[in-house]
Image: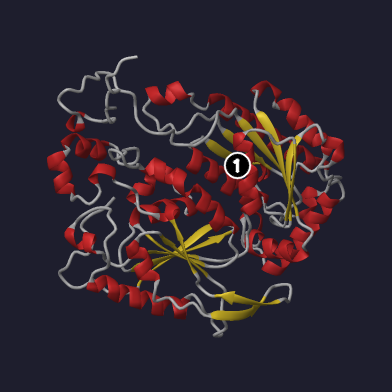
């Protein structure tokens, strides 16, 4: 063996402006993990199953967006009700759904067939990875696509027919059944999602509720739950909005992620409050990243935020305590901003009548909520980056979404990092106050507001502002509150990830 020491490994460099003069690597490997931490997955068709007012359309929309946002896979919902309304061209009252109404049954069958034809065409034409690269379309991970067929699909014969019709697509078929045995949840869904929708525009709410309940009874006459007779199929059954979940023949990475998402999804009303930290010393100096403390103005915001949260979030309109959660990143400026939020022990009564004690706003710090890491550029101003790494500045300007800082992160990395916390937020039944950073809140805001992932870089997340997001059955509502006015003539945040 040679006595010579092994050569010193050369650190990877991603652009000419960072390469040593002696470095000879004309065809470098592209650095970084895949933008989705995943394995290959085939095309998937999810077929919804369930009586009306069981949240099928809500599940469909949220699931499609989850898969497209966090995994970059094309996803689309095909709602048979939309096709039925186009064919019927009139408001469909309860008698339209009576199985003895032959004319209506023919129109409903036509709607189902047209929706399925469009689904098969779409899933067969979704661009391949090479097509996306050739057309410079965004590609993340190595997934197929997800199509969701949203209808009641209430009988075993209908489900068998759908499986047969989809054989030629080669897609993996997964049935998702929403069962609701809690009548309170059914009435809540009818009131919030059905009254005033396309079928009941201009109809008196009391009349709409009575008619929709009659529609449900028509479906109940023929409805067959998934179970042992269909054990050869792949299915996920959700009971009472996630209280119970059972699976059958669910295999593979993406199907398992779908099932985990569904077990956390619910429709209980609560809000998320997104706040950046108060102005930091690096904000004042125009530097990105770092772990600096707050300025005097940042401390003023921290105190104002504590007062605002104590009054507007922790208490209900009648003054009773509302159990809430408080999350921060692990960085100093967020923890210092959140420290004025009160954390008393409060007593409250659950929906089932139990009396419990709760540590209000107990702070929980997550590394996943840390700001996008700028790597070698951490702690620099954008002027310094342009002077020292001109190629990096140009690359970031060309594609801010996919750009990755040298030895740092990109927005696509950040999306992968935030996926576990998206699950945590989905499952939370309590309001959550999140004191974090601009890039973090851009991603969370874009996800919950149903925006394409590539558009998160354009979301405005100003300092001194709380953004309230409230998920509903029809999307998310947004409300912004300026908690502390900016000093006149002062730019609080010249730097932006």
Secondary structure of residue under mark 1: helix
Residue 302 falls left or right of residue 396:
right
Q: Residue at x 34, y 59 (%)?
A: 461
Residue 250: horizontal and vertical position, in percent? 70, 36
Q: Farthest left residue?
A: 387
Image quadrant containing the N terminus:
top left
Label 1, on which residue?
257
Which residue is more in the foreground, 353 or 457? 353
Q: Farthest bottom residue?
A: 319
Is 278 drawn above or below residue 212 in the view shown? below
Q: Is residue 452 visible?
A: no
Which residue is more in the foreground, 52 or 59? 59
Mark 1 residue crowding within 10 angstroms, few (<14) / some (14–19) / many (20+): few
Q: Residue at x 53, y 75 (%)?
A: 360
* Quarter holding residue 247: top right
Q: Is residue 495 visible?
A: yes
Q: Residue at x 62, y 32 (%)?
A: 44
Q: Residue at x 14, y 46 (%)?
A: 384
Is 187 drawn above or below residue 78 in the view shown? below
Which residue is more in the foreground, 43 or 252? 252
């Amino acid at each position: 063996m040679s006595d010579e020491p092994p050569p010193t490994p050369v650190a990877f460099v991603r652009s000419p402006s960072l390469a040593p003069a002696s470095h000879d690597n004309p065809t470098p490997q592209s650095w970084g993990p895949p933008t989705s931490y995943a394995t290959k997955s085939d095309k998937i068709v999810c077929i919804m199953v369930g009586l009306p007012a069981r949240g099928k359309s809500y599940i469909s929309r949220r699931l499609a967006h989850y898969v497209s946002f966090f995994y970059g896979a094309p996803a689309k919902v095909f709602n048979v009700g939309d096709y039925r309304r186009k064919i019927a061209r009139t408001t469909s009252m309860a008698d339209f759904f009576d199985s003895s109404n032959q004319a209506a049954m023919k129109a409903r069958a036509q709607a189902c067939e047209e929706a399925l034809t469009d689904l098969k065409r779409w899933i067969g034409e979704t661009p391949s990875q090479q097509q996306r690269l050739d057309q410079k379309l965004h590609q993340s991970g190595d997934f197929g696509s997800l199509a969701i067929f949203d209808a009641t699909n209430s009988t075993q014969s209908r489900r068998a027919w759908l499986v047969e019709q989809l054989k030629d697509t080669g897609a993996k078929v997964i049935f998702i059944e929403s069962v609701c045995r809690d009548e309170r949840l059914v009435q809540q869904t009818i009131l919030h999602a059905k009254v005033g929708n396309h079928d009941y525009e201009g109809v008196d709410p009391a009349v709409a509720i009575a008619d929709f309940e009659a529609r449900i009874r028509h479906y109940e006459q023929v409805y067959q739950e998934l179970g042992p007779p269909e054990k050869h199929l792949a299915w996920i059954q959700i009971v009472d909005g996630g209280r119970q979940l059972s699976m059958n023949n669910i295999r593979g990475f993406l199907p398992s992620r779908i099932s985990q998402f569904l077990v956390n999804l619910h429709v209980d009303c609560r809000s998320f409050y997104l706040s950046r930290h108060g102005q930091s010393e690096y904000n004042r100096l125009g530097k990105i990243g770092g772990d600096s403390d707050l300025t005097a103005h940042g401390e003023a915001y921290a105190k104002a935020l504590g007062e605002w949260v104590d009054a507007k979030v922790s208490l209900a309109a009648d003054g009773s305590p509302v159990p809430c959660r408080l999350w921060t990143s692990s960085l100093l400026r967020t923890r210092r901003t959140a420290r004025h939020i009160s954390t008393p022990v409060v007593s409250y009564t659950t929906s089932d009548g139990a009396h419990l004690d709760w540590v209000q706003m107990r702070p929980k710090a997550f590394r996943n909520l840390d700001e996008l890491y700028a790597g070698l550029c951490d702690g620099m101003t954008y002027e310094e980056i342009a002077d020292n790494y001109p190629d990096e500045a140009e690359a970031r300007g060309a594609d801010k979404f996919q750009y990755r800082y040298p030895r740092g992160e990109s927005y696509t990395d950040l999306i992968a990092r935030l996926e576990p916390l998206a699950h945590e937020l989905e499952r939370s039944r309590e309001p959550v106050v999140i004191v974090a950073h601009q890039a973090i809140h851009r991603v969370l805001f874009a996800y919950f507001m149903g925006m394409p992932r590539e558009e998160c870089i354009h979301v405005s997340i100003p300092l001194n502002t709380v953004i309230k997001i409230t998920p509903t059955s029809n999307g998310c509502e947004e409300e912004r509150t300026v908690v502390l006015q900016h000093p006149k003539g002062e730019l609080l945040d010249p730097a932006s990830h």
